[in-house]
Amino acid sequence: MRRRNQIIIICLCVYLCVPGNLFSEASNMESLIPPESPDGWAPKGAPQVFTKETLFEHINGQADLFLQYGFERSIFVDYRNKNVGEEKIDLDIYDMGNVLQAFGIFSRFRQDDLSARIGLDSYLDDRYALFYKGKYFVVLQATEPNPSTLKQLARMVESKIIDTSPPPKEIEFFPKQGLKAGSIEYYPQGLMGRKILKRGFKATYVMPDGTAAKPESKADSPDSNLFIAIFDNAEESESALKEFKELLAKGATAQARTSAQPGFEAAKGEDPYQGKLVIARKGSYLLGAAGFENDQDAEGLLAEMAASIK
């Protein structure tokens, strides 16, 4: 009897030592799992919860990327349908901490612009459905082509997510003309492969007629990109621009200039990997254009971007 009481006390102590929000968050995420799809697919077995410490057990090759984007926890379950043999659909729901990080990891996994109009943005093909909404990034993967069920399950998960956070505001800073659909990406560090830029967004641009913003004779040259680097304040962005000017000054074609637009400073130069560069500062942001053959295209888009930042 005494031994039994000791075991009960030990178990109680262990329970009390586990953070309460670990249980509540796992329970909240489990509530996002649809019990069954309209065409008979249902979860097989209990959901599995993964944390920062255990994510490698589930997606070893991709865990580092998720952790870079602020991964908190995830829940996984696979769906089976007794009428379709060994086929299955895996569902992963990732809590990325906030909507910016959820968009970021989504932006790195989607391919092209195949939106299913689910959540804040989505991607759907024959075997994959991806979307983000609020702080959640959701992935459904089918072993056999099944876009209809993937879309049904994705919509059911989305309807259970009550996080109404809007998309990252910086997405709207990118000019629409020439923007390649589905190309905006967020990087938590090393934007454009440069430590100086830290975190931010980049997008690919094409000419209004749909051709690449570079001639076919230079098809192997860098993509034409606009980017926005985010800093904590205007002092940090000013310091980064100064450092960038020093880097560009090492090139023979580099030149620094100040725009007539208030609060809009710019520097021009060329990079062996990213082509022509135009870097500008607006408040706590550094804006840039890289790889554009036509200087007027680059500067016009940058000016439009700067004007959208209030």
Image (spheres, rainbow, N blue to C red):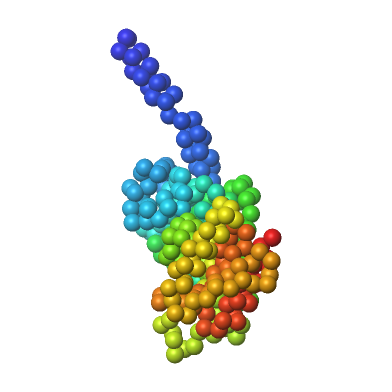
Task: Give the answer, above or below, for where 77 lies relative to 302.
Answer: above
Residue furthest to the left: 3
Q: Is residue 161 above or below residue 10?
A: below
Residue that protrudes farthest toward the bottom in the picture: 217
Identify whether 19 is placed above or below 4.
below
Tell me which residue sits at (55%, 84%) in the image: 294
Q: Is any atom of residue 164 visible in this view?
A: yes
The percent position of residue 202, horizontal first and vertical second, equals 52, 67
Quadrant hosting residue 182: bottom right
Residue 152 is left or right of residue 275, and the answer is: right
Residue 190 rendering spot, x and y as whole percentages: 44, 60
Q: Residue at x 57, y 77 (%)?
A: 298
Quarter of the rendering occupied by the C terminus:
bottom right
In the rendering, at what x and y percent does residue 70 appear?
46, 49
Q: Residue at (39%, 24%) from the top-left corner?
A: 14
For image coordinates 39% across by 59% down, the residue present is 87
| Residue 138, percent from left and from top | 50, 54
Q: Is residue 35 shown to the viewer in this render?
A: no
Could you say which is closer to the camera, residue 28 or residue 237? 237
- Figure label count: 0
Relative to 281, is 188 above or below? Answer: above
Quarter the N terminus occupies: top left
Q: Is residue 143 left or right of residue 262?
A: left
Q: Compare residues 175 and 34 and report the one nearer the observer.
A: 175
- Near-viewer residue (110 or 155): 110
Quadrant of the rendered image containing residue 145 = bottom left
* Residue reaching furthest to the top: 2
